[in-house]
Image (tube, rainbow, N blue to C red):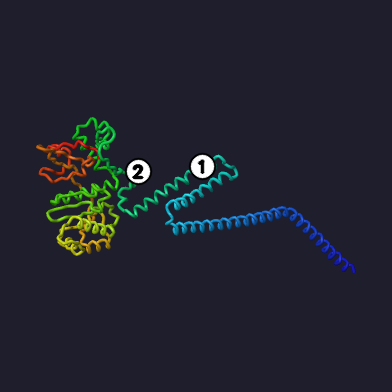
Amino acid sequence: MKDYLWIFIIIGAAIIWGIISWIMEIASDSKKYLELKPKLDNLENSIKEHELKLKKDREELELKIKKWNEKVENDKQEIKKIANQKSMGFPWLAEAYADYFALKDGEIEKYLRYKKSPAYKAAENVKIIKEEKKELVRENKIIKYKINYFVKLFPWLLDLIAEDEGEEIPVRVEGNIGNGKSEDRVKNYLTQEEYQSLPSVERNQMALDRYLRNRHKSKWAIGRDYEMYVGYLYDQKGYSIEYKGIIDGFEDLGRDIIARKKDEVCIIQCKCWAQYKEIHEKHIFQLFGTTMEYWIKNFKIHKNSKNFDEFSGFLKEDKLRPVFFTSASLSTKAKEMAHALNIEIVENEPLGEFPRIKCNINNDKSRQKKIYHLPMDQQYDRTVIGNRSGEFYAFTVKEAEDAGFRRAFKHRF
């Protein structure tokens, strides 16, 4: 009986100890729970905050994407509208272009005005500048549209458009202006001290050298040099040269040079273009057309009417020779057209060295006047060399003066 009692006592003690341990464990867990609960609450709040922020960011992103898509679509519609209605006129296009950029400036203005620390004065200045810029952009666009339109109608206008502000602009002044005295254009290539101190030979030679080395010549000036170079080449072959492009300007009808020798007439068109450019068939057609126009006006034949067969006969007999002379190359199509139309081609011929000083002899009553002209002189382009014995082209001023020639008195170009 006693043995059973001890067994019950031991079992009872074990149960009591188990209950006490369980209670102590629960108390410990409760304590840890109380310690961790604030942290868990903070973590839960943080997760909710992040979820809200993520949701807000997602909504803002979706709104931005929507606005961007709307802007892209609006831009597409505006571009399409411009493309479809471009015939409505330059001012409308320029206004649309100006409005587009004014809108961008308006966004900057709004940002300055409504940001957290508003910059009202800066925003007002941007607003004023925006309006001024809009008008300038509009005027600039109108000018560009007009230039592009005119260039499409008259491609040769490109020869007169300067590519940078340092280019020499071709201006021809007829007669005297101001006080009635001719201004020596040599001064444009010399300092005042050089012009006043140097002897005339050295002064004129220095101006000529600087004229030739000038790297900022306009396309017109480069074309003029090239025409003179081609004319000189034909002059050396015994042709009498008449410069049409240099003298007549826009009225040359594509005939830059007319070279004559006996019964032969060459109608020459010159193009001094960069090597990477290519001559297309439209220039060949222009030369062919202007050659025919020259034939109609200048060749007398017995028949009352002139027809294409007769004109073609003149070309085949070399009585009339259209020549296309260029520093660039011709496209395959242009060469095919030139061959079919009996047009002679000289391509990839760069501007070479040649004497620039024209030594001219004028008969004035009983005596002769021996005068030389520099490329910047007034009568240079109109002066023809080779009509009289003793006339020639000189490389240097000293060569001209040693031959008894003096510089022309009229210097204005």
Q: Position of residue 69 (x, y in %)?
A: 53, 58
Q: How many badges with numbers are in the image?
A: 2
Observer-nearest of 344 and 175: 175
Observer-nearest of 129 and 302: 302
The crowd level at tag 1 (other Cα within 10 Å; few <14, some 14-19, many 20+) is few
Q: Position of residue 288 (x, y in %)?
A: 23, 59
Q: Position of residue 390 (x, y in %)?
A: 11, 43
> To which quarter of the image does residue 54 belong?
bottom right
Using the rendered image of the protein, determine whether residue 265 is visible from the camera's viewpoint.
yes
- Left or right placement of residue 69 versus residue 349 in this view: right
Q: Which mark identifies residue 380?
A: none
List the residue tagged with mark 2: 165
Could you tell me which quadrant the C terminus lies in? top left
Q: Residue at x 19, y 46 (%)?
A: 354
The crowd level at tag 2 (other Cα within 10 Å; few <14, some 14-19, many 20+) is few
Mark closer to the chain start, 1 or 2? 1
Could you tell me how far apart the alpha carbons at marks 1 and 2 are, in whole angstroms? 29 Å
Q: Residue farthest to the front?
A: 304
Q: Which of pointers 1 and 2 indicates the residue nearer the eye? A: 1
Q: Which mark identifies residue 128?
A: 1
Q: Residue at x 59, y 42 (%)?
A: 117
Q: Secondary structure at mark 1?
A: helix
- Left or right placement of residue 210 versus residue 235 in this view: right
Determine whether label 1 and label 2 are within 8 Å by CB: no
Q: Secondary structure at mark 2?
A: loop
What's the amino acid at mark 2? Glu
- Left or right placement of residue 345 versus residue 105 in this view: left
Observer-nearest of 295 and 266: 295
Q: Residue at x 29, y 46 (%)?
A: 218
What's the amino acid at mark 1? Ile
> To which quarter of the image does residue 411 belong?
top left
